[in-house]
Amino acid sequence: MKNYDVVILGGGLAGLCLSIQLKKSRPNTNILVLEMRADEAAAAAHKVGESTVELATYYFREVLGLKDYLIEHQLPKEGLRYFLSPEHNDDLARRFEIGPFYSPKFPSHQLDRGLLENEMVRNTRGIGNECLLGSKVKDVSLNADDATHQVTYLQGEDEFVVSSRWVVDATGRGSFLKRKLKFQKEMDHDVNSVWFRVKDAVDINDWSDNTEWKNKVKPGFRRLATNHLMGTGYWVWIIPLVSGNTSIGIVADESCHSFKDINSYEKAMNWLKIYEPVAFEKLSDIGEDPLDFRVLKHFPHHTGKLYSSDRWAVTGEAGAFLDPFYSPGSDLIAINNTFINDLILRELNDEDIHIRSVVYEKTHLAILDNWLPVYQNQYPLMGNTQIMLIKIVWDWAIYWAVPALVYYNEGYINLIVLKQLFSAEDSYGRKLGNLNIKVQQLFIDWLPHDTEKFANQYFDIFEISLLKKLHEEIQTRYEVKELILKIEDNVKMLENAAAELFRLISNKANGTSLDMKVDPYSMELLNPEKSIEGGLEPDENARKDIRMMWLYDIKEEV
């Protein structure tokens, strides 16, 4: 029987990333990766998850050392781009557009998952890890004492058994250990998705003959973005792939758009004809069948466990998955794997990891629970231009203010940082989580009162000073005390922005008095249970930022 330090069940993105991260961190670690796929992954039609954002990009490029590969063999990403005002779905140039004028300061990528995972198999083998394709995990026998675990797997009809100090489940939605140990957990977020890849380079800049609109950004800039066509209860992604093909996806809330209306290619195209007719027309002009068509019904799922001092863990979709909006999937893999990497290294060096395993698990579950309100019950807002503009800015501000900054500074594996920011009841991490819940609820409460329509406008979110500042600072290196103080400052800035937002929403908009009794600087919304402790004085910087997004002040005739 062969013996390993770590056996990773699953050789998809999460498992391969972890194998490389572990080997780079501790070169003498003996690692086996077992992957069910027998052959190389197909280019342009393997797995969804092509878009990355700052945290995951840093993980791929710097932590895993894939920077040169990504630059040479994958596409650059020119930010996230949103097309709102679905009432103008017959004319892309008339829609309210959100997107950067210039390349973001920090690079990110559009990933062909098939090409990437094939490269990562070669990479992990090249640095000395065993990676066996065509291997189906049959059973895992976990030992709580100091004895090694046993993993039984099949290759064809042949059965093998290996022992290992650690076992990590990266089996994706198969969730081997979650099912075996019964720590499944539902997530209250009923959203479905379908996607397909087309054999053509789709450039949405060609979707209009409006010369002024086409020339608003430099050639190719819109094509290389992660594009979102948005309407009430749904969004459609358009993502370019390095192969020259394009990924198209529909993500929709079941309460607004039934899964049975989009769960085949023909149905999905008919649905696009109704809700995104320009996309339907341009995709129909390609004239070829799609390379693939995939579906996921009620894709969000939670988990009751992630890490154990009994030397096992779960990562990637074997644990939890939230929502693809804002592309957080690879971010969560990066955080997940970084926790696991630290636990394994410490345990293999004979350190007691019980306290860390508990703290890391509570922190990760808190991250998931604090991230969920960004999506939960928010899909009906996607057809509202004013609300979605402010929501997008707010959501990105929170992401850059805490999660990205903490990760870049290795704060997630620093117990002092975790204690100061997330453990105490009055910690700034918890305060921000509570503030975010209230602001997300504010967006929901606002919706019935906001009926204004907007068109013919372009908005670059980096014109907002708060957002630009947070984005520019995410790669700044801080000492531990400085990092904690910086995050406290960031949370205070977000509190001021929220206070100004509450104040504006409580005033009249579109001639309708909003039914919200708001004390703007104690932010007491509707009832005492929603109040935020402690009043805030007016902040001129926050007022200026929110006013820039307040479209009622700059509305053009529709």
Image (cartoon, rainbow, N blue to C red):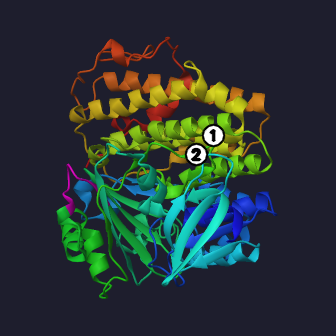
Q: Which residue is found at the position 61% from the left and 77% from the top?
A: 132
User: Residue at coordinates 38% horizontally, 64% vertically from top-left?
Assistant: 237
Q: Which residue is mark 2?
A: 307
Give whichever of 89, 533 is nearer the camera: 533
Label 1 residue SS? helix
Q: How many labels, in total?
A: 2
10 Å crowding of disc 2: few (<14), some (14-19), many (20+): many
The amino acid type of the residue labelled 1 equals Ser
Residue, disc 1 = 357
- The image shows residue 58 at horizontal and vertical percentages of 67, 56
Residue 337 horizontal/vertical position (percent): 62, 53
- The local secondary structure at tag 2 comes to strand
Circles 1 and 2: CB atoms closer than 8 Å: yes
Looking at this view, is 271 or 409 the one in front? Answer: 409
Q: Which residues are magenta?
A: 251-259
The residue that appears at 59% across and 22% down in the rendered structure is 427
447 in relation to 506, above or below: below
